[in-house]
Amino acid sequence: MTFSWKRVNAILQKDFKDFSRNTAVSIVIFLPIILAAVYGRMGLDSIQAHYMNINMTFAMVGTYVQCCLIAEEKEKNTLRGLMLSPASTLEILGGKSLLTFLLTIIIVFFSAFLSEYKPANITIVAFAIVLSTLFYIGIGTLLGLVAKSVMESSVIVLPVIGIFTVGSFVTAWTEKYPILKVAEFLPNVQLIELAEKVEQGAGFVQVFSNLGIIGIWVVVVFALTVVVYRKRMID
Amino acid sequence: MENAIEVKGLAKYFANFKAIEGVDFHVKKGEIFGFLGPSGSGKTTTIKILTGQLDPTEGEAFVFGENVSHLKNPKARKRFGVLTDNSGLYGRLTIYENLKLYCELYDLPLHKIDEALGFVNLKEESKKKVSTLSKGMTQRVILARAILHEPELLFLDEPTSALDPVNTLHIYEGLRALNKKGTTIFLTTHDMQEADTLCNRVAFLNKGKIRLLDKPSELKKRYADSTLTIELTNDEKIQLRKDAAGAEEMYQLMKENRVVTVHSNEPTLGDIFVKVTGGELI
Ligand SMILES: Nc1ncnc2c1ncn2[C@@H]1O[C@H](COP(=O)(O)OP(=O)(O)OP(=O)(O)O)[C@@H](O)[C@H]1O
Ligand SMILES: [Mg+2]
C-alpha cells in the first residue's frame, strides 16, 4: 500500500475549494458555533450541555458533511476518477476525510471556547475528542458510500445522527427498560462518561475502558468503510 | 512485439443478460485499435472490464501482460488513461483546478496542464467553471485529463461523440501525434468514418460478440464489389462487372458519349458492418 502526503494534500486542497463554494452544505458548520454562543450566554455549563454542543458538531460536521461530500463524489462519478488514478485506497479515503476532520476539531474547539468548557484534564479530553471525531467521520464516509445519491444520503444519515447524539438521553431510562443498557456502549455516551470522570479527577487509567470502547467503534467503522469502498471500486 | 491488451473468451452477464460473450482479441503495442458497434453492443462493458471497473463473468483479460484484476494496484494505473461516459469532473472547480488535482495525483509538473489544454483546444477557457461548460467542452476536459500523463495505453469510449467537426479533426491530429510518441489507443465508436481514418485495425461488435476483425483496408478489399456504377446521360444508373464483357459494354457507352460518371463500388466500413450483422448502426 503506497501513501503519499502529496496526493492526500491534493485531495484536501480540492475539497477545500469545492466545499467553500458549496454554500448549501458549508453553512451547516456555523450551526454548532451559534448554539455554543447561545449556551455560553445562558450560562449553561454542565458537562451535559457542553457535550450537547460537541455531539452536535460531531453529527453535523463529522457525519453529515462528510456523508454529503462522499455521496456527491459518487453521484458525480468523480470518485471513479480518483479510483482510476494512481491514488491508493488509503490516500483517497484519508484525503477525503481530512477536511472534515480539521473542520470538526476547529469547531469543537471554538464551541468549547464559546460555551466556556474548561476540562480538568485537557490531554485526556483532547485525545477522546480526536478519537470520537474519527468515529463520526468514519460513519459519514460509510453512509456516503452506501447511499445511491446525495438526496438519499441526507435522508439515511438522519436516524444515524439521532442514535449517536440523542443516545445519551436514552440512558436515563435504563432502570425502567434494561434493554436500553446497550446504549451505554454508544461512543457518545462513553465520551460523556469519560468527560464526567475527568472532572472528578480521573487520569488515563480510570478512563481506559471508555477510550477502549470508542476505539473499538472506530476500528469497526473503518474496517466496514474499507470493505464497502473496495466493493464500490467494482460496479 | 508484446501485446498491450490480450482478451481471451471474455464474457459478462448482468443477471441473465449476456452483455458480451466469447470475446477474443489482442491489441499490439503502438496500435490504434477500434472497437465498433451499435448502442448496447457491449463497448463500454468491455472498457470497464479492461480498466478493472467491472469483473468479467468468464474469460481473462490482460493489460501489459498483467491480469486486469491486478489493476487495483495503484502503480499499474499510472500506465493508462481512461475516458468513459461515466467519467466525472468537479463542477464547482475551474477546468484548470480540475486538471491540477490530477497533475498532483500523477506527480506531474503543472506545465502539463497547458499542454493537455492545447491538445483539446481549451487554453483560453481554463478559468471557466466546469459546471458552466457545454457538453463538448466537458468531454474535451475529460480527454485532457486522460492524456495529461501521456499514458502508454489510452482507453477512449466514444471520445468525439459530442464534438463539432473542427474540434473532432483537432482531436484526431492530437491522437495521431500521441500515438506516434508511443501511446497505444483503444477506441470505441459507432462512427465508422472515425474508425476508418484513425484505426490500424478494427473489431466489429454486435450483440456482445465480435463479428469481424481486421485492418480497414483489408476489410474493404474483402468486401469489395466487382462492379462499377455508371451514370448515363439519360439519368439512368447501370452496374457493370469489372470483366471483359463489362469493358466491352463500357467501350460502347463511352463511344456513344453516354457516360456522365463512373464509380467503383468500394464499400465503407458502415456498409460492411450492415452486411456482416444484418443490422443498421445507430
Ligand atoms: N450495470 C448493468 N446492469 C445491467 N445491464 C447492463 C449494465 N451495464 C450495461 N448493461 C447492458 O449491457 C449491454 C451493453 O452495454 P454497454 O454500455 O457496454 O453498451 P455500449 O456498446 O457501450 O453502448 P453505447 O454505444 O450506447 O454506449 C446493454 O444492453 C446494457 O443495457
Ligand atoms: Mg457505451
Image (tube, coloured by chain):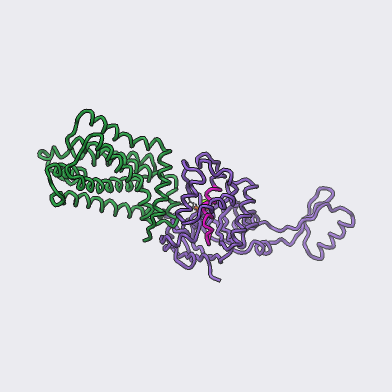
Q: Quadrant of residue B137?
A: top right
* Residue B78 to residue A201: above or below: below
Q: Position of residue B170 (x, y in %)?
A: 63, 51
Q: Is residue B45 magenta?
A: no
Q: Main secondary structure of the magenta part?
A: helix
In the figure, the green chain has which letter? A
Q: Quadrant of residue A68?
A: top left
Q: Position of residue A180 (x, y in %)?
A: 15, 42
Residue at the extreme top: A42
A169 horizontally vs A31: left or right: left
- Asked whether residue B80 appears in the rendered view, the answer is yes
Q: Position of residue A197 (x, y in %)?
A: 13, 44
Q: Position of residue A125 (x, y in %)?
A: 21, 45
- Asked whether residue A230 appears in the rendered view, the answer is no
From the image, which quarter does the N terminus of chain B lie in?
A: bottom right
User: How many marks overall?
Assistant: 0
Q: Is residue B151 magenta?
A: yes
Per the rendered image, the range of residues in magenta is B139-153
Residue situated in front as seen by the camera: A114 or A188: A114
Q: Colour of chain B?
A: purple
Q: Residue at x 30, y 46 (%)?
A: A137
